[in-house]
Amino acid sequence: MTLLSVNLNKIAVLRNSRGGTEPDICRAAQTCIENGCGGITVHPRPDMRHVRPEDVRALAAMLRGRVEYNIEGNPFAPPRGGYPGLIALAREVRPTQVTLVPDGDGQITSDHGFDLSNDLERLRPLVDELNAIGCRVSLFVDSGPQDFAAAKALGVQRIEIYTGPYAEAFAEGEPDAVLADCAATARLAQQAGLAVNAGHDLSQANLGTFKAAIPGLAEVSIGHALIGEALYEGLASTVRNYLQILR
């Protein structure tokens, strides 16, 4: 079955809006695990507007040996303040997977993937270091043809297809063309020996259609919609709903 990795950034946003420690991100992770999710995702950013380095460390301590731990972020964002940098955090906590994302400081959320024809050489030393410390490496990419064979040769193990355009097209009632592009991208990546993840704006409404179109989908990372839906349905039941869709 496709693994569900729950992104907990929005739990941290709510906590940070008030200060203090509530809601507790580790308690949220525990609830997700108890209800069957196979992974936890966080995306720390240099401005620390949601998940902070101390959250990354606390989650690593509680998750180790239980479920997969995926840390996302821009590997080129330099350290500043209390943020040590993505690779330094990975070196410290040794997550299962590091998903490299080309997001800038000014972005509210990730909105594009790497261009493998231009970015692979810059990524090479970072991929080498992550592999050396035992982290699986995934690259966030847009749908469309890319040099997945070169990424595989570099030491990348997975891609994560950026599904924002699919979710937007689904909401507009015209998902077929974008979904076909995602399915073609997944096939090309799998033919090159890469496993395929997906994430961004996936929801209970659109996930089933996407999953059905992507045979062998390894993992979905879902946060914004899942946490939003949990406000109405409860976190435990919402996680179970997503797992039922993935089955």
Image (cartoon, rainbow, N blue to C red):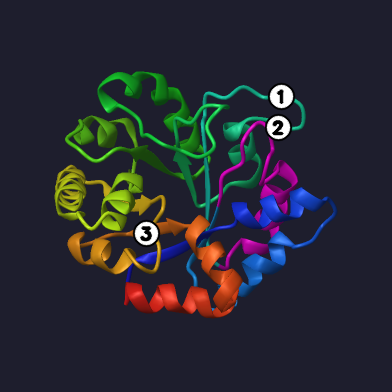
Tell me, for residue 209, which label it has, or none: none
x, y percent for residue 53: 71, 42
Residue found 58% across the figure and 65% down from its top: 65
Kind of residue at badge 1: Arg
Q: In the image, 202: left or right of 226? A: left
Residue found 58% across the figure and 34% down from its top: 86
Question: Could you tell me if residue 155 is visible in this image?
Answer: yes
Residue found 75% across the figure and 62% down from its top: 24
Task: Kindly state the secondary structure of the residue where label 2 is placed.
Answer: loop
Q: In the image, 113: left or right of 235? A: left
The residue beneath circle 3 is 219
| Figure check: 225 above or below 74 | below
| Mark 1 surroundings within 10 Å by alpha-carbon count, few (fewer than 14), some (14 through 19), many (20 or more) | few
Are the residues at dot 2 and dot 1 in contact (C-beta closer than 8 Å)?
yes
| Residues in magenta, as a range | 42-66
The residue beneath circle 2 is 83
* Distance (Cα) linking label 1 and label 3: 31 Å
Kind of residue at badge 2: Tyr
x, y percent for residue 247: 32, 77
The residue beneath circle 1 is 80
| Mark 3 surroundings within 10 Å by alpha-carbon count, few (fewer than 14), some (14 through 19), many (20 or more) | many
Task: Kindly state the secondary structure of the residue where label 3 is placed.
Answer: strand
x, y percent for residue 236: 57, 78
